[in-house]
Amino acid sequence: MIDLSRRLMLPEVMDDPALDPAVYRRCLADLARVNRVTMTHRATLAWLDRALGVWPGAAHFTLLDLASGHGDKLRAIAALAARRGWRATLVGVDLNPRATAAAIAATPPEAPIRYVTADALRYSPETPPDFIVSSQFTHHLADAEVVELLGRVAAMARRGWLIADLHRHAVPYYGFRWLARLAGWHEIVRRDGTASIARGFTRRDWQRYLDAAGVRAEIGWTLPFRHLVGSAPP
Ligand SMILES: C[S@@+](CC[C@H](N)C(=O)[O-])C[C@H]1O[C@@H](n2cnc3c(N)ncnc32)[C@H](O)[C@@H]1O
């Protein structure tokens, strides 16, 4: 039995720049499938829908997705905005230029989404966005970087922010392996997914980070084993 009482910074193969580009693209597309099967973005979409529903200025909103990966969450947000009749300006930031390229390729050119290759810890848009969201990113960071990110995001988002990431727990740690096998996802996705859960967080971790950053926020939890950390709902 693995000891998940503290974060285990196991390496993730997808972060290796030497990974074959075709394998990388396949794994990133698989990650988008993982998100779909596990309904990862549902909580973020519901949060945004609520926030925009009570905001009179919502006719046009700007949103930044930190570590946007394959861009699937931004495409889902663009679809939500289109359904509600809101005009959206969406930006996805990812450190890996291969993620940027794959996200651009998967996004219809008419979608209101722009992708930028940059470090989420350094990226400073000219105009602060209304909303900042991020999912499955913070487990890539060391504890001190999570604290730094929380401070930056809380200061930068004008209307609200939400960070979703993995709960470090034995159920998803062992369960994900089986799900990935059954679904036929690439072996790297299976291994990295498991490593990501070991690098993930407990509620106590999040409270400690928020205290260290001097940021007041809510910590929620949703299936499948995700913490949702963000500004209070409006
Ligand atoms: C597990 S993927 C998650 C992608 C997407 N958010 C999702 O939910 O599927 C993690 C992403 O974080 C990106 N990443 C890692 N460190 C980063 C950093 N410092 N700044 C921006 N992106 C980063 C990686 O390139 C990768 O695309």
Image: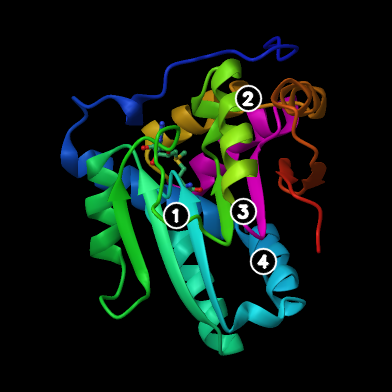
- Residue 181 is one of the magenta-drawn residues: yes
Check disc 1 and report the residue beneath it: 32
Q: CA distance from mark 4 to mark 3?
A: 19 Å
**Which of the two labelled residues, at mark 4 and mark 1, occupies the earlier sequence position?**
1
Classify mark 3: residues with Cα within 10 Å, few (<14), some (14-19) or many (20+).
some
User: In the image, is the residue at mark 1 within 8 Å of ligand 1 by its beta carbon?
Assistant: yes
Mark 3 residue type: Thr
User: In the image, is the residue at mark 4 within 8 Å of ligand 1 by its beta carbon?
Assistant: no
Residue 30, given in percent of the width and then of the height, sits at 40, 50
**Which of the two labelled residues, at mark 3 and mark 2, occupies the earlier sequence position?**
3
Ligand 1 quadrant in view: top left
Kindly report which numbered mark, 2 or 4, lies closer to the viewer in this rendering. 2
Check disc 3 and report the residue beneath it: 38
Q: Quadrant of residue 148?
A: top right
Check disc 2 and report the residue beneath it: 147
**Which of the two labelled residues, at mark 2 and mark 4, occupies the earlier sequence position?**
4
Secondary structure at badge 1 equals helix
Residue 215, given in percent of the width and then of the height, sits at 75, 34
In the displayed structure, does residue 231 sit left or right of residue 84? right
Magenta residues, as a range?
158-184
Q: Which mark is residue 142?
A: none
Residue 61, given in percent of the width and then of the height, sits at 54, 72
Secondary structure at badge 4 equals helix
